[in-house]
Amino acid sequence: MLLPAVSCDIAATRAGDPRFPLSSWERSKIRAWLVTGSSSCALELVGELSRAPAKGLVALTLEAAALPAHASGLRVVSASAGVVPESSPGDARDDELRRFGATLGGVTWWTALGRDAATLARVAVRQLPTGSATEPHEVSERRDRARTLLSESRARLWTSESTSWEGHAMKRTLCVVDVPAK
């Protein structure tokens, strides 16, 4: 049975009560949850289910990717790509990820995608002339050159083992991580 979506932005009806409708899910014998919201939403849901203590499976999309601590009655699986939800031990990107995390907080899927797009764009734009272009043919030529440079840009990315776009697409390996109970 597929139930209606529950917003991650709901508030508890009373102080100390769970945000999510745990008692309703228990009565309906719900034992599986799919989180498509943020990783903070996933952490909240898994925390409340663990304290309940509920049993079942919680699956996290790339947007919700996380490695939450959880009760042994729950199985938590998370989608994974690149450094999301976490880099592999000894990953060459670890120093960069640590600096980013210390300055701006944890890396989410959308953060990593934005960073990858900005990194490739920066590599391309650095090669463009810095003077102004006002004539329509100059503007058109610059746009074409920027498009070419972007398609040729290479960089170490956070969401993919690939280093570039290949034909307006990016190859990436998606995995499922079985998060151990803690």
Image (spheres, grey):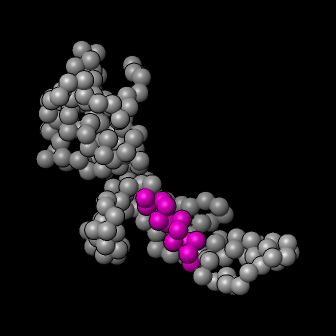
Q: Is residue 165 above or below residue 71?
A: below
Residue 124 quadrant: bottom right
Residue 88 position in % (x across, y down): 30, 65
Residue 103 position in % (x across, y down): 31, 68
Q: Quadrant of the N terminus?
A: top left
Q: Residue at x 28, y 68 (%)?
A: 102
Residue 117: in magenta span? yes
Q: Residue at x 14, y 38 (%)?
A: 72
Query: Is 151 or 10 nearer to us in this picture?
Result: 10
Residue 107: in magenta span? no
Residue furthest top as drawn: 27
Count of numbered badges drawn on the protein: 0
Residue 4 quadrant: top left
Query: What segment is highlighted magenta in the picture?
Result: 111-123
Q: Locate residue 72 relative to residue 103 in the image: left or right.
A: left
Q: Locate residue 15 relative to residue 126 in the image: left or right.
A: left
Is residue 123 visible to us here?
yes
Query: Is 14 or 155 nearer to us in this picture?
Result: 14
Q: Is residue 140 above or below residue 60?
A: below
Query: Is 79 or 24 nearer to us in this picture?
Result: 24
Q: Residue at x 41, y 49 (%)?
A: 62
Is residue 26 visible to us here?
no
Q: Locate residue 24 relative to residue 165 in the image: left or right.
A: left
Magenta stretch prevailing secondary structure = helix
Q: Residue at x 56, y 78 (%)?
A: 123
Residue 170 position in % (x across, y down): 56, 61
Residue 30 position in % (x across, y down): 29, 22
